[in-house]
Amino acid sequence: MSAVRAIRVSVAATVMTAVTMTVTGAVLSTGVAVAAAPDGPVQPVDLGALPGLTHNSAASINDRGDVVGSGYSSSFDSHGFRWSRGVLTALPDTARAPFLINDGGQIAGSLPGRFSSPGFVIRPDGTVVDPGFTPVDQNERGQVVGTGPVAGGTHAMSWNDGRTVDLGAPAGHTSAAVAVSANGWILGEVRSQDHLDDYFARWVHGRWVPLPSPNGRAVDINDRGDVVGWATTPAGTTHAMLWQRDRAVDLAPADRAPADRTPGAAAPDRIALSEALAINDAGQIVGSTFDPVTDAGHVLLWDQGRRTDLGTFGGSFARPLALNDRGDIVVETSTGSFRWRHGRTVQLGGSAEPVAINNLGQVVGSVLRPDGTSHAALWN
């Protein structure tokens, strides 16, 4: 995964889309909710706005503190910007919706449209390149992956140093890219025309290798090739999953006793709906639970085989937005937004709408202003 990439999966919108599976056994210890009362709040740094645009937000930040984002006043009218060393600069009209920037300064994004979204890459020298597909992720090597049109459907594609490679698909199938790791592991989805033979796969030695059965929905991959996501059990509940080498691990078996819980933690019979949403290169996994009865969502962290329920951070629900390689998590709740780091919680001040975090713990997003407009914002 890209450490500065925001989690773009919503529990409420996607939890019922997983496919049927047979749950594998997993030995996991569990922990109690540890989200303590927040420190702070940390006040936002106002990064400004593009002239004449009412809504502006940062989308990504690299470890050098460079930020990209976009502003708009109406649908399909995005305009991109880059913020660096205190200066906000408009990007060319061929780069309207940037959402990725790596430490080398390479930017990737798309051109929002009513019927299609062609993509772009801005090299560190400022040259704008059309990779021939819509990007979804990029890594520190400058490799960009995404999905582009081909005869009869779409294929996952990869771009690096000016060269686009079509990753293809098995006969009778199409493919789509999902994520790329820092060292080049690619996660994709292979789809059949009737969607009865869809599956997720790793790109290995020039071909798509399906994730080990059981399968489900996969959303992220790290430098070890570990993949996370979720799948449904024979009982019809959704569990967070880890696909590691040639095995599938159920991350959320109903194995907690009441003594393992603190007030506000999910009850054992209501932890069934869960998703793993991101994994970093240290193997830490962040995810969430969803209670269909109370609508309460909890943030979960898996670290070295231990699952910890971080609770709702004082709100009626909480969901993770981003994870970096240090294990810092950005969380949105019903009462505000927070950065969690090894048991310490800091509230993000202002009318915060965070979206991404870098490996220094800097968070970016937007803040709502009293006049109803929004500016891009940074929390250190």
Image: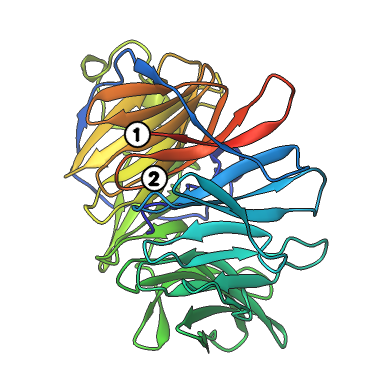
Residue 358 relative to residue 87: left or right:
left
Residue occupying the point 72% across, 30% down: 373
Where is residue 253 drawn, in percent x and y? 31, 38
Residue occupying the point 34% across, 87% down: 205
Determine the image quadrant of residue 251: top left
Residue occupying the point 32% across, 33% down: 254
Badge number at residue 300: 1
Where is residue 79 drawn, in percent x and y? 71, 55
Report the Cα–Cα distance between label 2 and label 1.
Answer: 10 Å
Precedes in sequence: disc 2 or disc 1: 2
Where is residue 202 drawn, in percent x and y? 39, 73
Query: At label 2, which amino acid type do we have?
Result: Ala
Query: At label 1, which amino acid type do we have?
Result: Leu
Note whether 234 is above or below 196 in the view shown: above
Q: Please say whether residue 45 is visible from this viewpoint.
A: yes
Residue 269 relative to residue 193: left or right:
left
- The color scheme shown is rainbow
Asked if the residue at tag 1 contacts the one at tag 2, i.e. Cβ–Cβ closer than 8 Å, the answer is yes
Q: Please say whether residue 190 is visible from this viewpoint.
A: no
SS at badge 2:
strand
Badge number at residue 240: 2
SS at badge 1:
strand
